[in-house]
Amino acid sequence: MNFDAIIESLPMYATGIGTTLQLLAVSLVAGLLLAMPLGIARASGNVWISRPVWMYTYVIRGTPMLVQLFLIYYGVAQFEWVRLSVLWPLLSSAWFCAVLAFTLNTAAYTAEIVAGAMRAVPYGEVEAANSLGMSKLQVLTRILLPSAVRRALPAYSNEVIMMLHGTALASVVTVMDLTGAAREMNSRTYLPFEAFLTAGACYMLLTFSLVGLFHFAEGRWLQHLAPRKNSSDVRGVVLATAPRI
Amino acid sequence: MLHGFLPTLLDGTLTTLGVAGASLVIAVLLGLVGAAAKLSRVPVIRWLASTYTTVVRGVPDLVLMLLIFFGGQIGINAAAAALGYEGYVDINPFVAGVATIGFIFGAYLTETFRGALMAIPAGQREAGLAFGMSPMRVFLRITFPQMVRLAIPGFTNNWLVLVKSTAIVSVIGLTDMMHSAGLAAGATREPFTFYLAAAAIYLAITSISLLALGALEKRVTVGLRRAA
């Protein structure tokens, strides 16, 4: 192990971590904004609304994200009208193409998670809301979505970790993210163990931080669905883990 | 439409399927060993298995692949030199790709198989042993057939992710489907056409897998009565 070489490259890795987190955050936020309406449409009883969304998620989930990234980064340049359009400065940037591909990808997976969580809400909750005279929109925003979003947390935490690992693909289209930094260090110093083990350790650190964050969130917002820890001491358990509202 | 590049693309598809199939074999073997290790009574073995699954799930597949491809090259040559070998050993990208993907999905299958094994009531194993069956026979006749049924949903999921993961072997220079599509795209200046064709082939592979594994699930759950 050549630790001097690692220490020398640390600033490059720090910049890489910044880029990785930026890619992750932007695509997760944009993907979630897309996924919410898509997920609601996917859970709709009307097949004319749910089928097109199913088609979209089926195609995205059935093909590798690398192909989706290449279609956007290399593919669209095939068409002259794209190269002449006002969007070309954006579409010729590797960073933008990576974010666009990651967003479209995570939107499909998240839409399925949202739809699945909405179907998991007990129907009695919806009936209760209906009998109180709530409108369809009120039932959606007050009952279905708050309940579904909480239920979706464990599956969504998996998706976030998958996306963190997925952002490594950005290095294939020349983005200098964390993996890009490791590849740069490898080609400069020819120390592959040092280069990729450092990157791997950084990714593990990021993964466990995110897992910890989601554990905390689940403890706060999903407590009512957790299995009871000790039935003889219900009060103590409730007091110990009651969410602070 | 494909300017005569269809054979190239299909050639790459064969490589992709070869990588996926070979990795699956390694992954299933590692998964079975890993699941047995995770349920072992020896703490050190359990600890080793958990370290394996934790590390793999914490690091992107691309980073692991680059580590094994570039790092393995140096490691093997250092080992060869230490053993007195004079020449230079080149790591075959196919071997590196299969080793990495098999290693990664072995960890995911470890969790799948462990969950399936744990879902089988211990009393059934005990009953088998009480009848005088050997532990191997209990595994083959009682545990394994039920494990297959319980593991199929997780296995399906892992296989689909595995097939899609093989796309990254093109990064270490293997002439898989992505690589062939890239070659054709460069020669014809029609990248969209060829990456779209690659996407269509991947979609066909995943769709056929879904249908086949769905049929298999139907077959192995034939004796199961559902509550609803």
Image (cartoon, coloured by chain):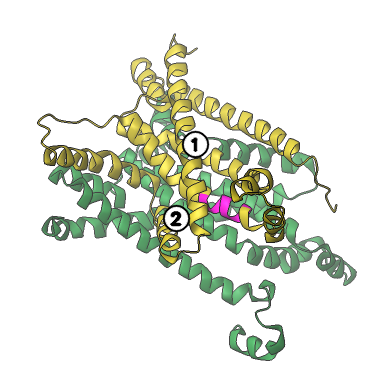
Chain colours: A green, B yellow
Is residue A110 shown in magenta? Answer: no
| Secondary element at tag 1 | helix
Q: Which mark is residue A174?
A: none
Can you give x and y, in whole percent of width and height, for residue A83 in the image? 39, 29
Q: Which mark is residue B53?
A: 2
Can you give x and y, in whole percent of width and height, for residue B120 in the image? 68, 55
Q: Earlier in the sequence, mark 2 or mark 1?
A: 1
Q: Is residue A107 above or below residue A153?
A: above
The answer for which chain carries disc 2 is B
Can you give x and y, in whole percent of width and height, for residue A185 in the image? 19, 48
Is residue B111 shown in magenta? Answer: yes
Q: Residue at x 38, y 43 (%)?
A: A169
The picture quadrant where one finds residue B181 is: top left
Amino acid type of the residue tagged 2 in the rendering:
Thr
The answer for which chain carries disc 1 is B
Q: Is residue B194 visible?
A: yes
Q: Residues within 10 Å of mark 1 (few under 14, many from 20)?
A: many
**Does residue A146 appear to the left or right of A93 in the view shown?**
right
Q: Quadrant of the C terminus of chain A?
A: bottom right
Q: Nearer the viewer, residue B12 or A21?
A: B12
The picture quadrant where one finds residue A9 is: bottom left
Q: CA distance from mark 2 to mark 1?
A: 16 Å
Highlighted range, magenta: B110-116
Q: Quadrant of the N terminus of chain A?
A: bottom left
Amino acid type of the residue tagged 1 in the rendering:
Leu
Q: Looking at this rendering, what residue extends furthest in the top direction?
A: B4
Q: Nearer the viewer, residue B94 or B13?
A: B94
Q: Residue at x 74, y 59 (%)?
A: A120
Q: Is residue A238 above or below residue B106?
A: below
**Tags 2 and 1 in contact by the CB under 8 Å rule?**
no
**Residue ID for mark 1:** B24
